[in-house]
């Protein structure tokens, strides 16, 4: 958790959040505003939603730029006068990248490069970016350790690995300081349950609430290190405020350090949702084929983040799902 002096550092900063109307980005914007920072959001609303910004849109410390990271002039304008960048803008989803690899590359690689160039040409102190656990690819080793990765299994995974390579070379060549956060299956409030590429947790929650049977890809034994949004927010804040020189220009697993298989996930969801609607506990779950590009198991070691950033995860899977279910019940 961040200290009072670190909170003061944030409150004295002007921070750009790209993709700030998205699930993670909007949570970051709201948290930063609450800590007293001046926040600029850049979003093209391709996957983000204006309603996510409703709590802060009228705040005098908040500024919204509607624009696309694929346009370098927009990136340069967005970085003017900024102290720190939290780069969340990307096209997520392995299936989306398999269907349309070009657009995923244009946004996730070319857009990322545009942001690095804009950061290099401005007075930005640190570039914190959303990396991905998909970078581990076909590596079967558990838990996942930052320095040991395999070959990517999807175009999306390639784009996120390229981000890490670009960030590293921009530090070595131009002195741009950055921290990459490899997100592991983030979930929580404001995550969109709709659309073809909706994440599994909000999608299953919505289906249970409609008394529909969710479909698990495969036999349900695939497991993930599901990570509640508050843990991700903490990691982003720590990446901004850390004064440890050894912690900068590194990549960190952003997770809990525990894994849950999909059968267990549905059981926990049914438990919490049944508190609002008892009939949900009787809904059967269906099974379908495995999804292309998926890795069987994902479990992070968070030792590096704990040691260098003083990361202390606050929400395990059950606590996080309890909070998420409450939010969905009140907002869907």
Image (spheres, grey):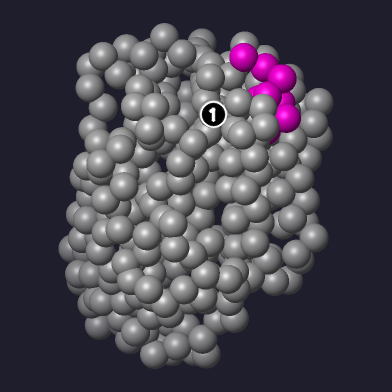
Which quadrant would residue 216 be assigned to in this image?
A: bottom left
The answer to whether residue 224 is magenta is no
The one nearer the camera, 93 or 332, is 93
Residue drawn at (44%, 33%), measured in percent from left and top? 248
Q: Position of residue 295 (x, y in %)?
A: 48, 76
- Describe residue 88's horizontal placement relative to residue 321 as left or right: right
Residue 270 vertical placement versus 168 (above, below): below
Residue 165 vertical placement versus 50 (above, below): below
Q: Position of residue 182 (x, y in %)?
A: 46, 51
- Describe residue 200's horizontal placement relative to residue 275 as left or right: right
Label 1 sits on residue: 177
The one nearer the camera, 278 or 83, is 83
The segment highlighted magenta reads: 116-123
Magenta stretch secondary structure, dominant: helix
Q: Residue furthest front?
A: 172
Residue drawn at (44%, 63%), measured in percent from left and top? 148
Residue 330 vertical placement versus 37 (above, below): below
The answer to whether residue 122 is magenta is yes
How crowded pointer 1 is (Cα within 10 Å; few <14, some 14-19, many 20+) is rated as many
Residue 172 vertical placement versus 277 (above, below): above
Q: Quarter of the image for the N terminus: give it.
A: top left
Q: Position of residue 249 (x, y in %)?
A: 49, 36
- Describe residue 38's horizontal placement relative to residue 275 as left or right: right
The one nearer the camera, 158 or 73, is 158
Note whether residue 209 is visible: no
Residue drawn at (60%, 56%), measured in percent from left and top? 161
Secondary structure found at label 1: loop
Total numbered labels: 1
Note whether residue 307 is visible: yes
Which quadrant would residue 208 be assigned to in this image?
A: bottom left
């Amino acid at each position: 958790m961040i200290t009072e002096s670190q909170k003061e550092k944030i409150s004295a900063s002007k921070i750009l959040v790209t993709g700030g109307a998205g699930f993670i980005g909007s949570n970051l914007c709201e948290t930063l505003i609450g800590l007293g920072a001046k926040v600029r959001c850049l979003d093209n609303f391709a996957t983000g939603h204006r309603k996510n910004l409703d709590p802060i849109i009228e705040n005098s410390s908040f500024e919204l730029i509607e624009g696309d990271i694929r346009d370098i002039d927009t990136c340069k304008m967005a970085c003017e006068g900024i102290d720190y960048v939290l780069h969340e803008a990307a096209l997520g989803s392995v299936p989306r990248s398999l269907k349309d690899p070009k657009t995923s590359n244009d946004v996730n690689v070319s857009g990322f490069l545009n942001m690095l160039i804009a950061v290099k040409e401005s007075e930005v102190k640190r570039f914190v970016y959303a990396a991905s656990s998909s970078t581990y690819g076909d590596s079967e080793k558990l838990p996942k350790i930052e320095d040991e990765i395999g070959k990517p299994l999807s175009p999306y995974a390639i784009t996120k690995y390229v981000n890490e390579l670009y960030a590293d070379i921009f530090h070595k060549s131009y002195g741009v300081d950055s921290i990459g956060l490899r997100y592991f299956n983030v979930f929580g409030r404001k995550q969109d349950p709709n659309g073809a590429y909706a994440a599994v947790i909000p999608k299953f929650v919505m289906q249970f609430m409609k008394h529909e049977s969710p479909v698990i890809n495969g036999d349900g034994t695939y497991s993930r290190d599901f990570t509640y949004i508050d843990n991700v927010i903490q990691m982003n804040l720590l990446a901004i405020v850390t004064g440890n020189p050894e912690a900068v220009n590194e990549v960190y697993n952003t997770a809990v350090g525990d894994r849950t298989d999909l059968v267990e996930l549905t059981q926990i969801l049914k438990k919490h949702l049944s508190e609002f609607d008892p009939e949900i506990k009787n809904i059967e779950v269906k099974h379908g084929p495995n999804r292309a590009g998926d890795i069987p198991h994902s479990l992070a070691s968070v030792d590096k983040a704990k040691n260098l950033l003083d990361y202390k995860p606050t929400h395990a899977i059950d606590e996080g799902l309890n909070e998420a279910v409450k939010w969905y019940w009140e907002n869907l």
